[in-house]
Amino acid sequence: MQLIDGKATATTIKAEIAAEVELIVENGGKRPHLAAILVGHDGGSETYVKNKVIACEQCGFKSTLIRFEDNVSEAELLAEVKRLNQDEDIDGFIVQLPLPRHISEQKVIEAIDYRKDVDGFHPINVGRMSIGLPCYISATPNGILELLKRYKIKTAGKKCVILGRSNIVGKPMAQLMMQKRIPGDATVTICHSHTKNLKEECRQADIIIAAIGIPNFVTADMVKPGAVVIDVGTTRVPDATRKSGFRLNGDVKFDEVAPLCSYISPVPGGVGPMTICSLMKNTLSAGKKEFYK
Ligand code: GUN
């Protein structure tokens, strides 16, 4: 069994990005600039955004954090999105999700100029990704692809079962695993809350990507010996022994599943650090106007 070390891989990639940024700047180019909008004070979102700002520093990017209180109106938020769309110094920006209930996330996502949508959530980027055109790919699926690539895990012709059908992970992951390139070329099955014989589906999988948000959902009896297991779960569960009062729990019952696997990604330290790293790669692409002029 080999552990997939997302933390170390992310550190390597951020160093690669930082080196490229210094070359760009030395040659008179512009330092990439990422902005993030954070609404309210959700603990998870605060942590994610803080880590994104730290990652920007590590990559040599400029970053700007824009905060609103929970009671910001949808119109105010849309006006800020419009302002960022027009700000020429900002190469890419994100609006951290989830948003308060009175604001339509879809409306906000669609208001973002797709050329600055480094989260890859705009329908133009989602559509281009699904037909294999150059675009911003959402961070978590792209981070998983990067891990598969760097660990030289074979995907062509493999049976890949994805647990979960979210717009952010499950759906794009399925598109990417079936695409005609490497990593890709897999035979993909998506399982969700209405799937019959979910255990049997999993047992046939060469690769399981678990993104359902139910702690310890994937148990040893669902995993074929030699399978690759990627754990996307990050559920916060109370833990009195931690200073924060919680710990992150994956979707996979690691202790019993790991001995069966050829490769497995742990939580924390697996997919999580790669997600932010993918956002950094997209920001570098935005700075270089790699996909869109
Ligand atoms: N909330 C959870 N994941 C993400 C993400 O990748 N981007 C944004 N903007 N919000 C999120």
Image (cartoon, rainbow, N blue to C red):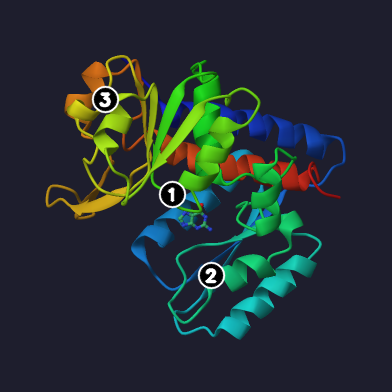
Provide residue 112's location: percent of width, then percent of height. 68, 65
Give the distance between the C-alpha atoms of the residues marked 1 and 3, in whole angstroms: 20 Å
Q: Residues within 10 Å of mark 3 (few under 14, many from 20)?
A: many
Image quadrant where residue 272 sits: top left
As shown in the figure, which amino acid type bears the numbered disc 3? Val
How far apart are labels 1 and 2 at the CA level?
A: 18 Å
Task: Give the camera-side residue of 142 and 178.
Answer: 178
**Marking on residue 223:** 3
Q: Is residue 57 visible?
A: no
Q: Quadrant of residue 238?
A: bottom left
Q: Of helix, strand and loop, which one carries label 1? A: loop
Q: Which residue is mark 1?
A: 165
From the image, state whether disc 2 or disc 3 is nearer to you: 3
Note whether residue 283 is visible: yes
Give percent across and percent down for residue 225: 27, 15
Q: Which mark is residue 105?
A: 2
